[in-house]
Amino acid sequence: MAVLTRLIPGPAAVRIGAGAARELPAILADQRISTSGRLAIVISEGSGAELRERLSGFLPADAGWFPIHGGTLDDAVSVADRIRASAVGHGVGSYDTIVGLGGGRVIDVTKYAAARLGLPMVAVATNLAHDGICSPVSTLDNDAGRGSYGVPGPIGVVVDLDLVRDAPEKFVRAGIGECLSNLSALADWELSHEHTGEPVDGLAAAMARTAAESVLHQPGGIRDDGFLTVLAEALVLSGLAMSVAGTSRPSSGACHEISHAMVMLFPGKYGQHGEQVGLGAAFATHLRGEPGRAGQLVDTLRRHGLPAVPADLGLDTSGFVEAVTYAPRTRPGRYTILEHLDLPEAELRDAVKDYVNTYAR
């Protein structure tokens, strides 16, 4: 008998709205994620203290609070060990849910720690910088640079628009670049299917494309609740697309290879991840010979204050060429427009100059 359907992994609860973090206990109880209220809450050492003070009155009094220093693999292992030791040391039994309360670094660390402990994880996002809020991937720094680790996706996702508005606007802009880059990633996936036979998951592709198109065409700006809601939903959809596909392919192509190369070659120097992948997506689309789509991406990036050419990041042409040249080495085995064209450095330099001349102001 033919298989007529498939189960789609996804969170049991998604809540996006102003003040949503204050509803966390009710959301968890309603969905039977945590009826006991035994929560281990991971926060950052910096802004986490203010979040704890702001929200502790709405959360269970016996919740455990676990600050983390950074976003490394060691941080994730350490906080898992501290959560385990705290539960045993206080004689209260195991926590039944781990909550990551913060930005992408906190959520990625918490996802990995929850996987290590075998506990469900709830993401409470305080900014919209990237699609990790609902993805089955933890991106963590390690001794070799930066790695992506497969983990179970969050069982619950809460996005509090009050907290998002209080965060620096650069985080919202980064999330826009992250969503828009889906369009380039999907084009790379389809290119790989055509030339290598790599299968494309149509459902995952549809979800990732819907997320990107919704942001591309959404009116308004980063201060509007309507726009923020659409962006938050798009980031959730992007994460779900990766869960459905079982790979980051729906949201990661040449755009992300370029970003990873920039981080490895010029650590901490040129913008946020979402800004880098937005620029990378526009450049890769230009390389594919799609001026209409590339122009759309550039116009949308500029409308929301994101970099559209390397100079907008403070990066000169030579540095960008170096990053693009190195980019395929960051994802061995992944086939994108960069691997397909396999341009020598001189031709790549000409392509970058052509892109800059076309879109620089």
Image: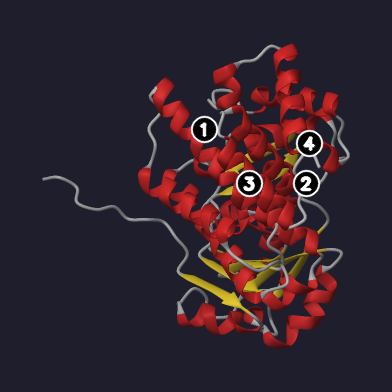
Label 3 crowd (10 A; few <14 / some 14-19 / many >=20): many
Quadrant where the image shows the N terminus = top left
| Distance of label 3 from label 4 (alpha carbons) | 22 Å
On screen, 349 above or below 90?
above
Q: Is residue 196 left or right of residue 140?
A: left
Residue located 68% across and 45% down the image: 298
Q: How many marks?
A: 4
Residue located 48% across and 50% down the image: 209
Label 1 crowd (10 A; few <14 / some 14-19 / many >=20): many
Q: Nearer the viewer, residue 357 or 4?
A: 357
Q: Which quadrant of the figure has residue 340?
A: top right
Q: Which quadrant of the figure has residue 228?
A: bottom right
The residue identified by callout 2 is 307
**Disc on the earlier residue, 4 or 2:** 4
| Distance of label 1 from label 3 (alpha carbons) | 16 Å
Figure colour scheme: secondary structure
The residue identified by callout 1 is 188
Residue 263's disc number: 4
Counting from the top left corner in percent of width and height, residue 265 is at 82, 29
Q: Are marks 4 and 2 in contact (CB under 8 Å)?
A: no
| Distance of label 1 from label 4 (alpha carbons) | 21 Å
Q: Are marks 1 and 4 in contact (CB under 8 Å)?
A: no
Q: Are marks 3 and 2 in contact (CB under 8 Å)?
A: no
Counting from the top left corner in percent of width and height, residue 51 is at 79, 75
On screen, 41 above or below 306?
below
Q: Nearer the viewer, mark 1 or mark 3?
A: 3
Residue 94 in view in this figure: no
Element carrying mark 2 = loop
Element carrying mark 1 = helix
**Disc on the earlier residue, 3 or 4:** 4
The residue identified by callout 3 is 297
